[in-house]
Amino acid sequence: MELKGKKVVALGERDSVPGEAIAEVARSAGAEVIEIRTECFV
Amino acid sequence: MDPDNQALIKRIVDEIGGDDLVVMLGAADAEAVEVAAETVRDGDPAWVGPLAGVQLGLPVLHVFEDEVKDQADDGVYEAQIGFFEMTLDVDEVKAAMKRARGDA
């Protein structure tokens, strides 16, 4: 799947990869990040 | 998947539709990854959240998957994900994503 031009919802986790890091990667691939969340299970 | 995130995704699909929408995960727990992928595709398997019985059929990728890494800028990927690749079980996450897609 080509990420360029896609709208990405980044769902990260505080204890693994946070949403902001996912978003940066998605943007660098040409995707538009429309929502960022970092879940916390603690 | 957290009911709040289910509600978020349902709202986004209601507002802009599911075309061109991709959910990208960062969880390291294999079971959590599988459940999240199943939830946004086929609905909440626990039948408790807003996506219970809602089959959105959205594509799901994990940030560790080669499909993401190959398309990302190398420098950005290394800066943002490199540390997590060293400390988390990448292979287990990739296997979980394959199982979620029925590829395994």
Image: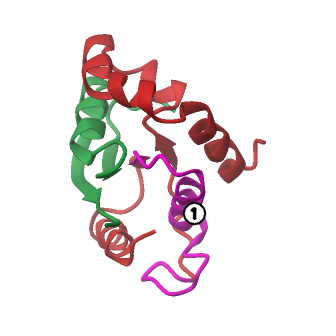
Chain colours: A green, B red
Residue at the extreme bottom of the image, as rendered: B48
- B45 is within the stretch colored magenta: yes
Q: Which residue is mark 1?
A: B35
- Residue flagged by tag 1: what amino acid is it? Val
Where residue B74 appears, x then y in whole percent? Answer: 33, 12
Image-based side of B26 in relation to B44, left or right: left
Q: Position of residue B97 (x, y in %)?
A: 61, 45
Residue lying at 53% horizontally and 82% vertically, measured from the top left: B52
Magenta segment range? Answer: B24-52
Q: Secondary structure at mark 1?
A: helix
Q: Residues within 10 Å of mark 1 (few under 14, many from 20)?
A: some
Q: Is residue A2 above or below residue A6?
A: above
Visible residue check, residue A4: yes
Residue at x-position 57% and y-position 82%? B53
Residue at coordinates 36% horizontally, 63% vertically from top-left?
B17
Residue found at x 49% / y 42%: B61
Label 1 marks a residue whose chain is: B
Give the image quarter of residue B92: top right
For the question of whether residue A11 can be seen, the reply is no
Residue extending farthest to the right is B104
